[in-house]
Image (tube, rainbow, N blue to C red):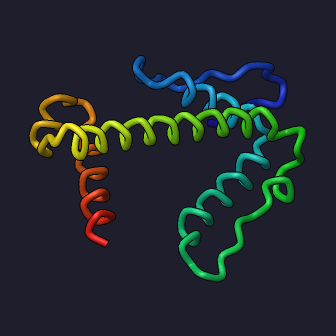
Amino acid sequence: MKMSEKTDFIQLPPIKKDTPSEVVSMIWQYLKLPEESRKRVTADLIDVDENCEKEDFQIPDLYDIVPKEEIAEFEETMRKIIAGIISQASSVATWVYVQKYVKHKTLDEMLQEWKGAGQFIIVMDTWFEKLMAE
């Protein structure tokens, strides 16, 4: 999307109505960044994604890429999204642990009980199995 220098507003592309508000907010904050800053942020996110598992990889300092004033709102929005993800993951992990080891439910029983979280339940169940085997 190319924006005119004289335009004081932007229009987001159509977004599914069930898109979490935090994600819409993050997109909005990202699009408010100057174009050159968006390019640098995008390039660094790609670099982190592709290279973060390498032993010698150094996570870039965001403020070396974009001035703190430009990125403050985007950074705060991302912090909220990441905190939400961690909170949700912790909740699922706790639920699976209680169902599996306190209530002694099988994986199938857990999947039947919480249909919307199937993939997460399977991952946590597998992880607990591996962890308890050590």
In the image, what residue occupies the spot 62% across and 26% down?
A: 25
Q: Quadrant of residue 55?
A: bottom right
Taking the image as shown, residue 94 lies to the left or right of residue 32, namely left
> Residue 124, position in %: x, y?
31, 50
**Res. 88 in view:** yes
Point out residue 115 in the picture as x, y percentages from the top left corner: 19, 30
Placement of 86 over or under 18, stated as above or below: below
| Residue depicted at x 45% and y 41% | 90
Name the foreground residue: 133 vs 76. Answer: 133
Residue found farthest to the front:
102
Q: Nearer the viewer, residue 35 or 92?
A: 92
Quick check: can you spot residue 2?
A: no
- Residue 115 vs 70, above or below: the answer is above
117 to 6, vertically: above or below: below
- Tell me which residue sits at (66%, 59%) in the image: 43
Report the residue that reaches farthest toward the bottom. Answer: 56
Residue 83, picture quadrant? top right
The quarter in which the N terminus is drawn is top right
* Towards the viewer: 17 or 122: 122
The residue drawn where x is 20% and y is 37% is 103
Q: Where is residue 102 shown, x and y percent of the image?
A: 25, 40
On-image quarter of the C terminus: bottom left
For residue 5, side relative to residue 90 (left or right) = right
Apparent side of residue 133 relative to residue 44 in the rendered image (left or right)? left
